[in-house]
Image: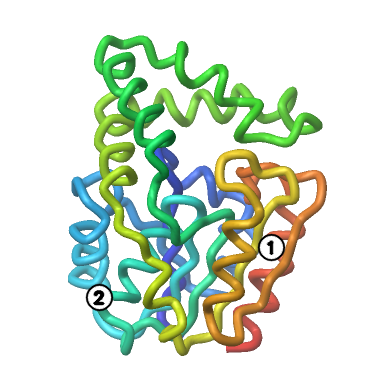
C-alpha cells in the first residue's frame, strides 16, 4: 500500500499526529507532509505534494491540512484513492475571519504572538482539555514562529470556495469533527459530508478543534477502520 500522507493544520508540525503515528505505523506506511511550511498558497502546497509523492495518494488532513487535501484532490482527482478530513471545511473565510486574521498578522510580525495565541486556546480546545494541552499547543505555535503564522494565515485567507466541486469526489471519504469545535464549527463538517457522495461522518464528544490530541484513541480507531476498508 502507498504511504498514508498526514497533512498538519495551520502552524502545526508532526507532533499533531504523534498518537496516530504511534498507533498506525506498525501496520501502515506513513509520511507527514511539511509542504504547508514551504509554500505560500494552497495550490502551490498541493502541487508540491503531488510532485514529491508520485503514484496513488491516501490523504488524511486536519484543519488546514484537510483544506490542502481537498486542493490536492482538485488538482489530481485520479490520484487520490482515499480521503480523511478531520475538523476541516470547504468554505472560504468570511469577511469577519479575514479581518481577524488581517489584524493578527501585524502582531505576529511585531513578535506579539502570545497576544493572539493565548486567547485562542479556549477556542481550540474543549474546556476539559485546556489544562493538559494548552502548554503543548502554545509550544507548537512557538516552534512554527511568526513567519509561518503569517504565511499560513495568508494562505488560508486566499483559499477559494471548495464546495462547488465536492459532489465530484469519488474516493472513500471519512469526515470527523469535535462536537465543541469553535474554530471550524460542526456545521462545516456536516456540510462536507453532505456534499461528498458516500462520505462517512463521525462526531467526537467532549472535543474541540484539536481532535488528534483531545480524543486520540477515538481518532485512531476511526482511522484504522477507514484504512481497513480501503
Residue 52 vertical placement versus 132 (above, below):
below
Count the marks: how many?
Answer: 2
Q: Which residue is mark 1?
A: 220
**Element carrying mark 2:** helix
For disc 2, the neighbor class at 10 Å (few under 14, some 14 to 19, many from 20) is some
Rendering quarter of residue 28: bottom right
**Element carrying mark 1:** helix
Of 82 and 55, nearer the camera is: 82
Which quarter of the figure is the C terminus placed in?
A: bottom right
The CA span between labels 1 and 2 is 28 Å
Rendering quarter of residue 56: bottom left
Of 155 and 2, nearer the camera is: 155
Mark in front: 1 vs 2: 2
Q: Position of residue 119 (x, y in %)?
A: 57, 18
In terms of sequence position, does the residue under pointer 1 or pointer 2 come before the other?
2
**Left or right placement of residue 159 versus residue 62 in this view:** left
Residue located 45% across and 61% down the image: 90
Q: Which residue is mark 2?
A: 75
Q: Position of residue 171 (x, y in %)?
A: 48, 86
**Left or right placement of residue 61 versus residue 51 in this view:** right
Amino acid at each position: 500500500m502507498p504511504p498514508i500522507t498526514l497533512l498538519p493544520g495551520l502552524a502545526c508540525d508532526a507532533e499533531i499526529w504523534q498518537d496516530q503515528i504511534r498507533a498506525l505505523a506498525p501496520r501502515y506506511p506513513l509520511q507527514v507532509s511539511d509542504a504547508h511550511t514551504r509554500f505560500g498558497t494552497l495550490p502551490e502546497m498541493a502541487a508540491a505534494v503531488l510532485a514529491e509523492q508520485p503514484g496513488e495518494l491516501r490523504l488524511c488532513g486536519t484543519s488546514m491540512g484537510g483544506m490542502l487535501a481537498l486542493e490536492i484532490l482538485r488538482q489530481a482527482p485520479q490520484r487520490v484513492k482515499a480521503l480523511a478530513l478531520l475538523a476541516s471545511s470547504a468554505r472560504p473565510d468570511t469577511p469577519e475571519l479575514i479581518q481577524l486574521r488581517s489584524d493578527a498578522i501585524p502582531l505576529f510580525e511585531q513578535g506579539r504572538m502570545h497576544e493572539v495565541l493565548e486567547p485562542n486556546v479556549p477556542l481550540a480546545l474543549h474546556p476539559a482539555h485546556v489544562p493538559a494541552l494548552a502548554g503543548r499547543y502554545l509550544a507548537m505555535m512557538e516552534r512554527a514562529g511568526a513567519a509561518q503564522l503569517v504565511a499560513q494565515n495568508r494562505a488560508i485567507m486566499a483559499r477559494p470556495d471548495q464546495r462547488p466541486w465536492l459532489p465530484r469526489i469519488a474516493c472513500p471519504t471519512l469526515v470527523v469533527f469535535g462536537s465543541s469545535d469553535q474554530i471550524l464549527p460542526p456545521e462545516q463538517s456536516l456540510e462536507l459530508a453532505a456534499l461528498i457522495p458516500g462520505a462517512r461522518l463521525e462526531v467526537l464528544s467532549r472535543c474541540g478543534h484539536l481532535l488528534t490530541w483531545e480524543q486520540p484513541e477515538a481518532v485512531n480507531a476511526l482511522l484504522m477502520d477507514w484504512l481497513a476498508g480501503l
